[in-house]
Image: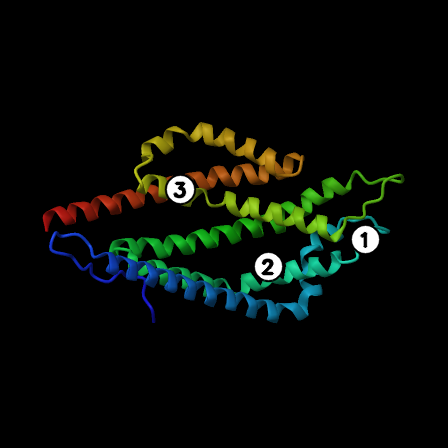
């Protein structure tokens, strides 16, 4: 298997790296990156092929929170001749990517890992898995808890003069935006750990900013969720709780970094 580790530098008489050696190393990295991306894309295409026959079931699952609150005579529609086809295509591609995530993560790890120190490897991979897990937890939290309440509120504006008939394209865009927003908001612990590890902030500094994060969480929730109080609370409180989790994890990361530094000094 190709490796992203740079070959030992060839030094000239004056102690500088040989231009040819540096060029070869760069080309090697680019070829390795191309190979990893190609394999990841191949896995996504394979997942796409597996998911395509089930495109209608996948879409039916995605629109479930909306169809359960739609009035009896309302239904999904498409207003463009190709809208249904491209909507199914996007959904299947997304499903294919989700099926291929283990392969994509492995290719990313295989490219990055050889360039890391041993201590960094022990931290990087668990943090990567934690980040992906938190993203899916956030997306699932949004889909199963926020979607039903938010769509019930939004559909309540339908009446005898206004019929709720959402289009496939608009619903897909709206739901994906919410899923991404909740998934990204659940990355708060990862951001806290990264900032502490890089020395941008301290654990004490994170603790001191609790009140501002609490207020900011609800302001952010008001901006990215539907205009109902329930959805905003369901996003605001998790962000605040995840911030507290980020403080605890950052404290652990800081202690481990200090122990490694002390061990290095004693050697």
Left or right, 173 with reference to 190 = right
Residue occupying the point 76% across, 50% down: 167
* Mark 2 closeness class: few <14, some 14–19, many ≥20 residues within 10 Å: some
Nearer to us: label 3 or label 1: 1
Nearer to us: label 1 or label 2: 2
Rendering coords of residue 140 (x, y %)? 57, 52
Label 3: element kind: helix
Nearer to us: label 2 or label 3: 2
Residue 75 is marked as: 1
Please name the residue that numbered disc 2 is placed on: 94
Residue occupying the point 33% across, 39% down: 196
Residue occupying the point 78% across, 53% down: 80
> Which quadrant of the structure image shows residue 18?
bottom left
Query: Sequence order check: which comes first, mark 1 or mark 2?
Result: 1
Question: Residues under labels 1 and 2: Cα distance?
Answer: 23 Å
* Mark 1 closeness class: few <14, some 14–19, many ≥20 residues within 10 Å: some
Is there any visible trace of residue 73 in the rendered image? yes
Left or right, 226 with reference to 75 = left
Question: Residues under labels 2 and 3: Cα distance?
Answer: 29 Å
> Which quadrant of the structure image shows residue 206?
top left
Please name the residue that numbered disc 3 is placed on: 246
Label 2: element kind: helix
Q: 164 or 4: which is nearer to us? A: 4
């Amino acid at each position: 298997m190709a490796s992203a580790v740079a070959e030992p530098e060839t030094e000239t008489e004056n102690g500088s790296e040989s231009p040819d050696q540096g060029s070869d190393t760069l080309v090697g990295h680019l070829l390795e990156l191309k190979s990893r991306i190609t394999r990841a894309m191949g896995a996504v295409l394979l997942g796409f092929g597996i998911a395509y026959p089930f495109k209608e079931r996948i879409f039916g699952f995605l629109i479930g929170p909306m169809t359960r609150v739609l009035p009896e005579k309302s239904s999904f529609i498409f207003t463009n001749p190709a809208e249904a086809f491209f909507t199914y295509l996007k959904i299947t591609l997304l499903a294919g990517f989700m099926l291929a995530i283990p392969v994509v993560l492995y290719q990313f790890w295989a490219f990055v890992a050889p360039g890391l120190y041993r201590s960094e490897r022990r931290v990087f991979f668990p943090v990567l898995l934690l980040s992906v897990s938190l993203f899916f937890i956030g997306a699932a939290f949004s889909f199963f808890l926020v979607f039903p309440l938010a769509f019930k509120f939004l559909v309540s504006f339908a009446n005898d003069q206004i019929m709720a008939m959402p289009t496939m394209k608009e619903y897909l865009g709206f739901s994906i935006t919410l899923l991404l927003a909740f998934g990204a908001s659940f990355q708060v612990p990862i951001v806290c750990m990264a900032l502490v590890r890089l020395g941008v902030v301290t654990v004490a500094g994170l603790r001191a900013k609790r009140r501002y994060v609490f207020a900011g969480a609800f302001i952010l929730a008001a901006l990215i969720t539907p205009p109902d109080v329930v959805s905003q609370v369901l996003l605001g409180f998790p962000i605040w709780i995840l911030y507290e989790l980020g403080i605890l994890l950052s404290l652990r990361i800081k202690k481990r970094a200090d122990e490694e530094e002390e061990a290095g000094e004693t050697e």
